[in-house]
Every structure is written in structure tokens, then in C-alpha cells.
Image: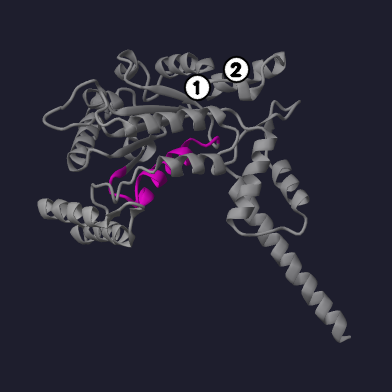
Amino acid sequence: MDFYRLMLYIVLLHSCKSTSGYSVLALVTDFFLSSYEKLRCPLGDCCNNHWIPNNTTKLQELLKQDVFGQHIATEVVSRQIEAHLSNPSPSKPLVLSFHGWTGNGKNHVAYLIAKSLFMKETDSQFYHHFISTVHFPHQHNTQLYQDQIRSWVSGNVSRCTQSLFVFDEVDKMPSGVLDGIKAYLDYVDRVDGVDYRKSIFIFLSNTGGKEITKKVHDIWLKGNVKREELTVRDFERLVELGAFNEKGGGLHQSRLIEKHLIDVYVPFLPMEKIHVRLCAENEFNKQKYFPRNKEAALQKIVDGLHYYPEDKELYSTTGCKRVAQRVSLYIAEERYNNRAHERRHHDSSEL
């Protein structure tokens, strides 16, 4: 079938060429080929370029629009994903490790990656999200979890080499579990006949959050370097050592670190009030709601969160994690007050 498809494409494409470019028939050809992919995969979500478009341009746009205060993470992630996907024969899978306090955007960036790579986004059968407290809850079952994770990863990559694996709450994972997939992340062409080099693995962890925040705050106190001037090199070794030495975490004494199989340790910086404000403004836009007094609304959301250090209130203790809920509550309250005002106005007019 692929032979006839290729021949049809060549014939149509050749007949569509003209001195001025491609005619309307060329567009028809592209439409036909797109339709062919859908017919060949009637239930959708097959392991091909139609269902896995790897849209890195979309990723760059989403990171710019939806992620605030994380210039290092957005730059590193965009560059690493682009480089990996544009390489027809990568030497190993791409392995990224996201570190920072909760609410600073680790899960959201992982979601945006899936949204950009797969036509069905996080509903794609080639996107796999593991949560340590759900899938690996017991500290004494390391060997069992190693066997399970090897089976899950090898089985899914056997079906599609362009798979994305996200391991959430790695800091709560039993030590040694991730070592079970070390061979799959190494510089080898195949393991038991399976090629893992086009897959992407992302680890999400709160480990290093304290060290990242301390470094950012120390730099702020000195006042000689702007936040926007910080780079991944300022944090990478700090986070790597923190993850390797933190007892009880999934990367504690991990062979993935020993063998340098994690490509980049991505720091997520603590979020300041200006970033919380941007998150709140973005959330109002997402909900398509325009408060009567925008400035007052945004200020109320910002002031409603907790910050540290207590004497300066520089960084949000929960990042932007609670912003969506606060915005929804504000909208509900304002709508209720508007309705109440309209009822009072209506009652008074009848008198």
C-alpha cells in the first residue's frame, strides 16, 4: 500500500508543478495524503507524522504565552526538544529533569510539551504520565517497581519509538526505581531489539527547590545580577548534587546521575508577585472574563497568596498553583454581587 501511495504522490506532485510554483492540485494532493493517514488509522492516534506532528513552533509559542518567570526553563526546554526532534538519529533518548518548588510550572511545561508533540495532546496513547505516590507508593517494593517500569517502558516504545514519559513526584519515589530503565536511557542503538533513542523522558521533582530559592535570594541580596541574567549553568551542578544526595528521593545515589544519563537539570525559579500577577491575568483571559476593575481584581488575587521571607514577601510559597482557583472564586463572587445589585435596582424601580 505504501508503494502505491508513494507513486500516487510522485505522479500528482509532478503534474502539479508549474513555473510559478504549485497549483491548486498540489493542495488537493496534500489533502488526499492527510485523509489517507486518517483512513489508514480509523480510530486515530497512530505512530506516524500525522498523529505525532512534533510541532516545536507551537511549543515555543505556548511556552511564551503560558509560562511566567521561568526564562531558563522555557529557553532550555525549547532548545533541547528542538535539537532532539530535528536529529534523525539521536545517540540516546532525551532525558530532562525539572526541579523546583511546587506551583512553579514543572507539570505545566510537561503538559505543553505533550500538547505540542501529539495531535491528541495528553490523550495520546504515546504520552505516559506516572505519579510516584500512585504508581510507586511503597518504599520496600523497589525491585517490583523496577520490573514494572522496565515492562511498561519497553512495551510502549516497542509500539512507538516517539513516546513521551513523564515521571511526576520523583522526590517521593523509592530510591533505585528509575535505575530499572538505565539501559534504555544509555548511549546504545537498541536494547533487546528496541530502539529508545527517539523517546523523551521527563522527571519532575521538588528536590533542589530549597537550594534554587536560596541561590536566587542570595543573588537578589547582592544586587549585582538581574534575575533575567541567570542561566542554567548557575544552577545545574547545584541541583544535580542535591538530587543525588537527598535521601529517600527517586534520584538518591542514582546510577542515572552517576553515568551522566540525564541531559539537563532544569531549574524552576521561585515566583515573585509580578509573575503571580501575570498568571492571574492569563487565567482571567482563559476564562474569558473581564472584571469591572481589572487592577483591583489582580491585586486581590496577588495579595491573597502567601509569600516568603515573611519580612520581605518576595516569593510565592505556592507559585501560581492556587491562582486558577482564586480567579474562579473572584469571578463567582463578582457575578453574585452583580446579580444582587441588579435585583436591588429592579426592586427599587418598582417602588
Q: Amino acid at mark 2?
A: Lys
Q: Quadrant of the C terminus?
A: bottom right
Nearer to us in this view, 184 or 72: 72
Whether residue 173 is visible here, answered yes or no, is no
Instruction: Report the residue marked by disc 2.
Output: 215
Residue drawn 60% across the image and 33% down it: 69
Q: Position of residue 131 (x, y in %)?
A: 37, 39
Residue drawn 70% across the image and 60% down it: 333
Q: Amino acid at mark 1?
A: Gly
From the image, give the main secondary structure of the stretch colored magenta: helix
Q: Is residue 119 magenta?
A: yes
Q: Position of residue 21 (x, y in %)?
A: 34, 51
Q: Position of residue 26 (x, y in %)?
A: 29, 57
Query: Few, some or many C-alpha atoms within 10 Å of disc 1 (few <14, some 14-19, many ≥20)?
Result: many
Q: Dividing the picture into quarters, in which one does residue 157 lie? A: top left
In the displayed structure, 94 sits above or below 22; it is above
Q: Is residue 17 magenta?
A: no
Q: Give the side of residue 269 with respect to residue 226, left or right.
A: left
Q: Dividing the picture into quarters, in which one does residue 84 lie? A: top left
Q: Position of residue 1 (x, y in %)?
A: 10, 55
Q: Secondary structure at mark 2?
A: helix
Residue pushed farthest bottom? 350
Instruction: Report the residue marked by disc 1.
Output: 208
Whether residue 289 is visible here, answered yes or no, is yes
- Distance of label 2 from label 1 (alpha carbons): 11 Å
Q: Give the side of residue 220 with respect to residue 189, left or right.
A: right
Q: Give the side of residue 320 with respect to residue 74, left or right.
A: right
How many numbered marks does the figure carry?
A: 2
Nearer to us in this view, 140 or 38: 38
Query: Few, some or many C-alpha atoms within 10 Å of disc 2 (few <14, some 14-19, many ≥20)?
Result: some
- Residue interval drawn in magenta: 104-127
